[in-house]
Image: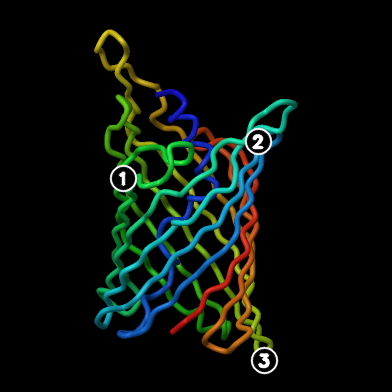
Amino acid sequence: MFKKIALASALAASAAFATWDYYPVLEAGKGSAEAGLYYDWDDPWSQAGLKIGARYSLIQNLELSLQSWGYQFWSEADCDGCANGGDGLRDLTLGVRYGIAPMITIFGDFRLPVGGDEVSNDEIAIYAGAQFSMPINDVPGMKLGTEAGVDWGFEHDHYERGLETHLAGEVAYTVPNVGVTPFVGLQMKIRLTESESEGGDGKEYGHNDDGDKQINIWLGADYFVIPNQLDLKAKLIVRSGDLDGDATGLYVGAEFFF
């Protein structure tokens, strides 16, 4: 059980951003597919792998997605005699977003523990909430996206993670006549209720972690090498706090629109 709890924290750096993005859904009949490599570290620990995903708008304002799937190459501590660990198929997230107004989107993400034994944390979870996004009219090419949601993990392996709320925002600016879009974002997680686990005596024991917080900050850029069709992106992610621990991450990927 405690191995799984530790594993959940180790995986958090590469799974911190569940929804596809913070901006409006694609037009009806449009979709995209993305693949990218991630590398996370906090000396002496590191992990790396491949993430893939796809999304498609079935009808106007309704977008379905498959996220965070892929393959993890390793997750281990850097020490003499350590065996490679944490390699295998990643867990899968299925998502749905619906635009209820031009600037407001509601969403639900369903995380399924389909990954390998050394990668999956065995937790089924639901993350749901709403997003608000808008262009910054005073600065052509700039846009703002925000999100607020609640993350609920179901009991597994005699352990139930406390309820969390997530608050996030991102600002992006497309440089005129260049096509490069730098962006910066911030996410805060707050645990609302105490996590609990069942001891060998059959009794429930609290982890005294209600009120714990986590901050994720990311800085990156994307560039359409083929206008409106092939977008290359890269970002640096830094996280700190009691929920997922401290780590730094890099992600590079490509998104193809169809």
For marks 1 and 3, give the one nearer the viewer: 1
* Quarter of the figure that contains the N terminus: top left
Can you identify the residue that label 2 sits on?
A: 45
x%, y% of residue 186?
54, 55
Query: Is 255 located above or below residue 228 in the figure?
Result: above
- Label 1, on which residue? 125
Kind of residue indicated by mark 3: Asn
Left or right of 214? Residue 103 is left
Give the secondary structure at mark 3. Answer: loop
Amino acid type of the residue that numbered disc 1 sits on in the rendered structure: Ala
Looking at the image, residue 46 lies above or below residue 199: below
- Helix, strand or loop at label 2? It is strand
Q: What is the residue that sits farthest to the top in this orientation?
A: 201
* N-terminal-most mark, 3 or 2: 2
- Find disc 3 in the rendering and name its residue: 177
Circle 1/circle 3 CB separation < 8 Å: no
Left or right: 196 in relation to 67: left
Q: Disc 1, disc 2: CB below 8 Å?
A: no
| Label 3, label 2: how far apart the Cα atoms are | 42 Å
Q: Position of residue 16 (x, y in %)?
A: 48, 50
What's the distance in space between the residues labelled 1 and 2, CA to CA? 26 Å
Query: x, y (%) of residue 129?
Result: 31, 57
The percent position of residue 239, horizontal first and vertical second, equals: 59, 45
The residue positioned 35% from the left and 67% from the top of the image is 65
Q: Amino acid at mark 2?
A: Trp
Q: Mark 1 or mark 2: which comes first in sequence?
A: 2
Q: Which quadrant is home to the C terminus? A: bottom left
